[in-house]
Image: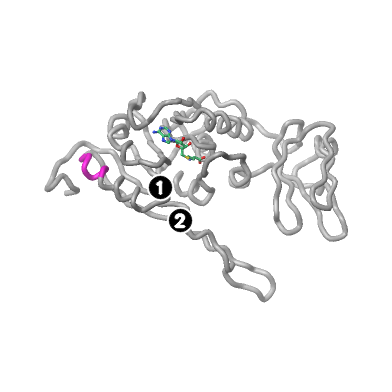
Amino acid sequence: MAQTSVFKEGDSIILVDARGRFYLRTLQPGKVERLREHVVDHDKIIGMNEGLIVSKTERDFLSAYRPTLAEFLLKIPRQTQIIYPKDAAFILMLADVFPGAKVVEAGMGSGALTIALLRAVGEHGEVISYEVNENFSRLALKNVRRFLGECPNLTVKGKDIYSEVDERDVDRVIIDLTQPWLVVPQAALCLKNGGIFLSFSPNITQTQRTVDALRDQGEFHLKGTVEVLIREWVVEGRVLRPLQRMVAHTGFITVARKREGYRGREGGEP
Ligand code: SAH
């Protein structure tokens, strides 16, 4: 979707205050709202350029921008856990999601990872998202459209991915659901050789079962399991130190690559 920097009706924007806190809004003609000590008049923002100040008081100001993908994901309406930007960023790299790729994803949840995948595969790529809960996929689709507009290259399937995957010759299978090991046989069927399987799980027990299943399958080259820890720093005058709080845990990321079958000793890696 081509974007100019001038805001128009219906655009998503973020309003950022002096302390860096930000608020996601959709521009609606005629709407005037209070945001803390500010009065935000949408009609004044429509037609404005990005990066300008839309309200100031003695101690604070609000400037308006288009949300980055990471900012949008942090603020989307959700009915499920979502994959956070720090993990989504690594998932795109570790699964090597490239422009034009055909990606199978499950479950869609609130669509956070779906949006990141769609952006990475681009308009010549394709994302097929399995989600058993229609209430979730409805909201997820709304979130996708809000950030990316219409996406003809997204297919949502209300099917249980544990029992069946229709696609073949898929480049990437990326999953975030409770029993990821049950997807391993499906992933072996639908991935092309050289394709990548990636699973995100909050618990190490889920990870262990998934790694065992990948090993037993005999058609995967295990690349390993990682977690992503981000330590933010305060850089303010003489205060130069890590922030005292950090997100301690979200999930483990396991990656494997599909290859020709091989059964060595005990069916493990040679
Ligand atoms: N990655 C998503 C969150 C996924 S939450 C995001 O970033 O927003 C896990 C989702 O998997 C839930 O919505 C759940 O309904 C769905 N799910 C669970 N089992 C499934 C199955 N067997 N097939 C398809 N979807 C499934």
Q: Is residue 43 left or right of residue 4?
A: right
Beta carbon at label 2 within 8 Å of ligand 1: no
Q: Vertically, is 172 above or below 87?
A: above
Q: Quadrant of residue 172?
A: top left
Q: Which residue is mark 1?
A: 201
Q: Which residue is mark 2?
A: 228
Mark nearer the viewer, 1 or 2: 1
Q: Is residue 161 magenta?
A: no
Q: Residues within 10 Å of mark 1 (few under 14, many from 20)?
A: many
Give the camera-side residue of 197 and 183.
Answer: 183
The residue type indicated by label 1 comes to Ser
Q: Vertically, is 105 above or below 216?
A: above
Beta carbon at label 1 within 8 Å of ligand 1: no
Q: Magenta span covers which residues?
A: 213-218
The residue type indicated by label 2 comes to Val
Q: Position of residue 114 (x, y in %)?
A: 51, 36
Q: Quadrant of residue 227?
A: bottom left
